[in-house]
Image (cartoon, grey):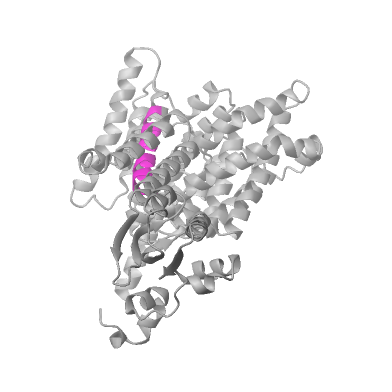
Amino acid sequence: MEKFIRKRVTNARNDIFSGITVALALVPEAVAFAFVAGVDPLVGLYAAFMVGLITSIFGGRPGMISGATGALAVVMVSLVSEGNAMGEAGENLGLYYLFATVILMGVIQMLAGVLKLGKFVRLIPHPVMMGFVNGLAIVIFTSQLGMFPNEYNSNLWVMIGLVALTMLIMWGLPKIKGLSKFPEALVAILVVSAIVIFGNLDVASVGSFIRDGGGEGLKGGLPMLHLETFSKIPMNFETFKFIAPYALILAAIGLIESLMTLNLIDDLTETRGDGNRECLAQGGANIVTGLFGGMGGCAMIGQSIINIKGGGRTRLSGIVAALTLLGFILFASGLIEQVPIAALVGVMFMVVIGTFAWSSFRIINKIPKTDLFVLILVSSLTVIFDLAIAVISGVIVSALVFSWENATRIRARKRTKEDGTKVYEIWGPLFFGSISAFNEKFDVKNDPKNVEIDFIESRVSDHSAFEAILNLVKRYEQAGKSIQLKHLSKDCKILLHKADLKFSDIIIEDIDDPRYHLAENPERFTKGIGEYKM
């Protein structure tokens, strides 16, 4: 019992410290993405707080951090600008169109959860996952480069030094005996902040970053219900037609990024999250965020990895991060504005190092060239376009490669029985991609009067394969020859019987073959271990 309590206390301590570190890292990210989208920084901070809190409590992946993200902000740019153009100057209609779009985005995400579409993330191939991770690491790295001064001067070298010091502390602290239990990211931020504040160093801080972007500061109040959204913009079909495409794209990007991040954290923690529950939580969070004046959000891979590496494993870490962020906004804006950007950039650079799949370099010569192509393709498209396009493209290419490879695997072994019947023993999957190769195996014109096709080593997979069998039977019948089908699956036999009653005579039902019966009724094997000798 004492050991159990000590473990729970240790986990809680790790969750709390990790949550505070994540909250510090969330501030500049949320502010930067708000600037990208063309809205006030508080819109991004409120989104980070509300989405982060709701998904931490109700989401399908404890330890995963959600908030305002760059992948969504990029899509919101044109939405806000087009919305502003629909109203008078200074009316800011784009902001209200954004809130309405985020609400619709949440509804779509919740529908995805109700329809249990979250399970489809398991169909994403490993090369796509590796490409996603590498591409995202590059995107995080390049996004941090914009934080450095543009001019080549002493300020640049000071910031480089502070970034390097942050990374050195995070690398070295876990290696020092007695200090390894301290959260290295939080310690690094506190140490570098103290050096900058007490050393009176002239470097960019969170406060200067906000003011340079046109904001007035970090301080704000509690999020308020924005019911004026429904009076500012017309609630009609034209509005729906305008926001629906944006909502659909944002929902897809948000779910893909969240479910991919969930998968990655599953691998890091050797546990399993619930994708469908995450879809519902993300959707609900975005509906609430849209109603309370936030820009919407989804899972953040960088902050999630900071949390996991810092020991955050339970829902407490995400809740602490969200509430701490709200505390910054309400009470500690002055202190947080003094945190140097260099410290946060150093933390993100360590995230990049931890995120990038360095093993992909070792396996270049060990994996199929098609998998290597998919890995590079997804990495490149993530950097050039966005995550949704990259992942969808990678899955499509992987599916096409898989279909092509399986299409070439169809085989037909031929033999002749003593009575002169020619037997075609089909091996390999029969589906839309292998139909051409399947048809080429038969010599209808020169075959004998009696032909038998044996499907015991094949599987009829789709409607195209079913149609191919129908057409083949018709070809033999038109040539005046007898054909019989053997070892077809139960589903295929039902469809053929429905298509034409003559298949009752064509399909051989009386089969004495234990392999076939086992394939047809696999549950029979569980009735008695000794029932089949395998």
Asked if residue 381 shows in the view, the reply is yes
Range drawn in magenta: 125-142
**Residue 409: where, in percent of width, then height?**
33, 52
Height in image: 19 above or below 510? above
Q: 388 or 270, which is in the foreground?
A: 388
Asked if the stretch drawn in magenta spans residue 133, the answer is: yes
Asked if residue 324 shows in the view, the reply is no
Asked if the stretch drawn in magenta spans residue 500, the answer is: no
Question: In terms of image quadrants, where is residue 77?
Answer: top right
Q: Is residue 392 left or right of residue 401?
A: right
**Residue 370: where, in percent of width, then height?**
32, 40
Height in image: 393 above or below 12? above
Q: Residue furthest top?
A: 152
Question: In terms of image quadrants, where is residue 170?
Answer: top left
Q: How many marks?
A: 0
Q: 360 or 303, which is in the foreground?
A: 360
Quadrant where the N terminus sits is: bottom left
Height in image: 199 above or below 17? above
What type of secondary structure mainly makes up the magenta span? helix
